[in-house]
Image (cartoon, rainbow, N blue to C red):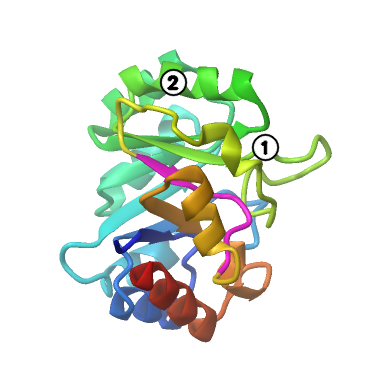
Amino acid sequence: MSIDVKICGINSAEALDAAAAGGAKMLGFVFFEKSPRNVTIDEARDLLTRVPEGIIKVALMVNPNDTETQSIARQLPFDMIQLHGSETVERVAELKAITGLTVMKAIGIAGSDDIARAHTYEEVCERILLDAKPPKDATLPGGNALSFDWSLIAGEKWQKPWLLAGGLNAGNLAEAVKTSGAGFVDVSSGVEDAPGRKSVEKIRQFLQRAHSL
């Protein structure tokens, strides 16, 4: 069984090319100024021209306002938006209507209450991303190289396709997949040499590992 992979936080041509060549199914581009992986609209436009046909292009935003969301959706050829903030179900529906794009909502998981909350978004999202809940003092909602207890979601039934995120790397991927039952995973910090600096070699290794499972 091969595991599908989303490489998030793409901000260089080298990382993009390595992810595409290695068989990534999704590529994520971060529009959040506090993130070391943040890209501008102009930077993203240049990078998106390199994405091969068939790979899903995802714009990640954190509690975006209408203007920001419209600007990104209208100027750039994205297929999906990923909402990684504290957006409510109602707000997700609004942003989906504004962009006309499919939506993936990221939910931080630390306990059963979070899993129940994640299910409430299935009515308005095409995909759910289950991530580690960030520490209270964290400046980033994701990409913190933290994992959650994967057994919390073992055997959980979902109405919509879901992705596993949070502290994944080539070394723990097999255990994460076995424990959680994930068939699609999202990685960012786990394929970096430093925050915001993607490693071509780590991207290759992660994708090779995912496709060998």
**Residue nearer the viewer, 75 or 34:** 34
Asked whether residue 165 is drawn in magenta, I would say yes
Neighbourhood count class around disc 2 (C-alpha, 10 Å): few under 14, some 14–19, many 20 upward? some
What label sits on residue 133 in the rendered view? 1
What label sits on residue 50 in the rendered view? none
- Mark 2: secondary structure: helix
Neighbourhood count class around disc 1 (C-alpha, 10 Å): few under 14, some 14–19, many 20 upward? many
Magenta highlight range: 162-169
Residue at 40%, 63% (x, y): give it.
44
Q: Residue 192, how many percent across, how many down? A: 61, 73
Residue at 30%, 64% (x, y): give it.
2
Residue at 50%, 44% (x, y): give it.
180
Left or right: residue 132 compared with residue 84 = right
| Amino acid type shown at disc 1 | Lys
- In this rendering, the answer to whether 78 lies above or below 21 is above
Return the disc, 1 or 2, that comes first in the chain's sequence.
2
Q: Residue 5, how many percent across, how many down? A: 38, 60
| Amino acid type shown at disc 2 | His
Residue to which mark 2 is pinned: 119
